[in-house]
Image (tube, rainbow, N blue to C red):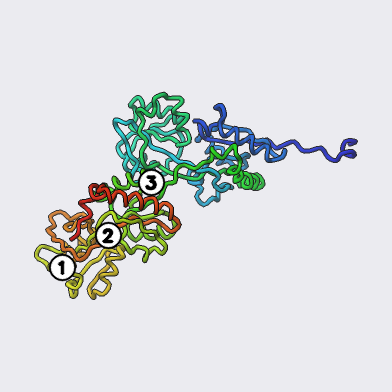
């Protein structure tokens, strides 16, 4: 009582709270020397000015999921992402914004390299090591369907041991842990192959239970300041920027295989990285407009009419042909004017073809190249107009037994396009492509797809 009269009430003791991490490998674990979870707990405690004392706490993913599913849990989970916890709408928990960037990699042995393509479908038929309990948004469906064998390991390091011993075909690891793996496995770079495309790049957040608004608000105020702290600046440096590109052509096509070989060289020399996803033409355009992709690898030279502000990367890498496919006993149109009076089907989403055929009275827009070809074979239309990367074939798969002929109506140069704001990347990529054109390397790689009619 006397102390209260002399100096006011005694300061309350700090609230002790666990700072959870689900990671078992350095540097995001909570037990190894110099781990980032302990460093973050100390940094946050100091900035709370006696309000909180954060305790680094390592909890494997399974027990952590069970903990946060119970109402009233206390503390915060760090290094997380809403997708991994089934909370994309951020309604189950209270989330901070992303304060760090991360990337997941697919690694394999150099004598049997594995690439990550087709949103994970390139791993079908393989065995893949992953940390037990971790959710694999892209691969869990394949595992459930029996198309991929998942081998759980306590740590990513254990998965690398399995890979080195030849007991799995590939392993999933975090980019941030690679320096630690090199220390633990001398000679790692001599036998390890890292897929050119990461499995994922993402932001790392922190989250608390719904009732811990004050704690979440404290974290939301403090975590953005990490980037300005000299102690954390190097740690938070983002992985190399990866441009998210889309293709409207099947990734398995001969054209796309040649184009990917070109892009691999161009992006490496420009000091950039990219991922590639296949989408139907119309959907690709919608997702480019909403910012889900940073560019498209195969669009004609006036694509900015559909995507205002888009940046064309010159020079062009290939030629596209607008083809009129007909039955062997059908008409042989050689110009757009020759289509007048004919029943014509056009796949929806190919804007250039839609525009060039707009004046045809008997034109029908259909859902996809395969539908267009099927209508032609069945005699429902006389002509199917579609894009093709050679003068004799289109993008579609011909139905069994179909005897069709193709005539070139027109052609257009194809370019890599980037979204507005990617000026620096566009300049760097264009400079590399221009040098490759001058040296003849571009023609060597894409010659089969750069012919004029």
Q: CA distance from mark 3 to mark 2?
A: 22 Å
Q: Residues within 10 Å of mark 3 (few under 14, many from 20)?
A: some
| Quadrant of the image containing the C terminus | bottom left
Q: Position of residue 132 (x, y in %)?
A: 45, 33
Nearest to the observer: residue 183 or residue 8: 183
Query: Mark 1 falls on what kind of element?
Result: loop
Q: Quadrant of residue 167?
A: top left
Tag 2 and tag 1, C-beta contact below 8 Å = no
Q: Quadrant of residue 347?
A: bottom left
Residue 151 got which mark?
none
Q: Position of residue 452 (x, y in %)?
A: 19, 59
Left or right: residue 266 versus residue 449 is right
Residue placed under numbered mark 2 in the picture: 413
Expressed as whole percent of the image width and height from the top left, the position of residue 141 reads 37, 43
- Quick check: can you spot residue 211? no
Q: Nearer the viewer, mark 3 or mark 1?
A: 3
Of the image marks 3 and 2, the number of the one nearer the N terminus: 3
Q: Earlier in the sequence, mark 3 or mark 1?
A: 3
Question: In this orientation, which residue lies closer to the viewer: 274 or 26?
Answer: 274
Rendered residue at 59%/47% (across/down): 94
Q: Is residue 308 shown above or below 49?
A: below
- Residue 270's label in the rendered image is 3
Visible residue check, residue 299: yes
Distance from the alpha carbon under mark 2 to that under mark 1? 19 Å
Question: Under tag 3, what secondary structure?
Answer: helix
Residue linked to disc 1: 334
- Please report the residue visible at 58 percent of the width from the left and 38 percent of the height from the top: 232
């Amino acid at each position: 009582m006397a102390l209260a009269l002399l100096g006011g009430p005694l300061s309350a003791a700090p609230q002790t709270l666990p700072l959870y991490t689900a990671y078992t490998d350095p540097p995001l674990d909570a037990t190894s020397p110099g781990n980032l979870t302990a460093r973050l707990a100390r940094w946050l405690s100091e900035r709370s000015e006696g309000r909180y004392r954060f305790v680094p706490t390592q909890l494997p993913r399974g027990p952590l999921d069970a903990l946060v599913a119970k109402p009233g849990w206390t503390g915060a989970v760090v290094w997380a992402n809403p997708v991994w916890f089934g909370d994309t709408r951020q309604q189950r928990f209270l989330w901070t914004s992303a304060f760090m960037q991360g990337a997941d990699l697919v690694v394999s042995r150099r004598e049997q390299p594995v690439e990550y393509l087709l949103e994970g479908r390139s791993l079908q038929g393989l065995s893949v090591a992953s940390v037990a309990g971790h959710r694999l948004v892209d691969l869990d469906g394949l595992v459930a369907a029996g198309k991929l064998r998942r081998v759980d390991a306590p740590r990513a390091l254990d998965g690398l041991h399995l890979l080195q011993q030849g007991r799995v075909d590939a392993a999933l690891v975090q980019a941030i842990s690679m320096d630690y793996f090199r220390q633990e496995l001398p000679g790692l770079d001599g036998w390890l192959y890292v897929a050119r495309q990461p499995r994922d790049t993402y932001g790392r957040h922190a989250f608390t239970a719904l009732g811990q608004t004050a704690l979440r608000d404290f974290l939301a105020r403090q975590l953005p300041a990490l980037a300005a702290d000299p102690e954390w600046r190097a740690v938070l440096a983002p992985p190399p920027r990866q441009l998210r590109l889309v293709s409207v052509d099947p990734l398995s096509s001969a054209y796309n295989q040649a184009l990917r070989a070109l892009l691999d060289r161009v992006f490496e020399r420009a000091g950039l990285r990219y991922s590639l996803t296949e989408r139907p033409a119309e959907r690709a355009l919608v997702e480019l407009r909403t910012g889900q992709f940073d560019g498209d690898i195969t669009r004609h030279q006036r694509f900015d009419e559909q995507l205002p502000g888009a940046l064309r990367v010159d020079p062009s890498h290939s030629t596209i042909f607008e083809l009129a496919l007909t039955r062997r006993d059908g008409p042989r149109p050689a110009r757009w004017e020759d289509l007048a009076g004919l029943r014509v089907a056009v796949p929806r989403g190919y804007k250039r073809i839609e525009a060039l055929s707009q004046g045809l009275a008997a034109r029908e827009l259909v859902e996809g190249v395969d539908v267009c070809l099927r209508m032609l074979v069945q005699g429902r239309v006389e002509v199917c107009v579609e894009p093709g990367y050679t003068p004799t074939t289109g993008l579609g798969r011909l139905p069994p037994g179909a005897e069709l002929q193709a005539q070139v109506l027109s052609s257009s140069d194809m370019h890599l396009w980037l979204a507005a704001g990617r000026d620096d990347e566009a300049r760097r990529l264009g400079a590399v492509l221009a040098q490759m054109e001058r040296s003849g390397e571009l023609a060597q790689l894409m010659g089969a797809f750069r012919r004029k009619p």
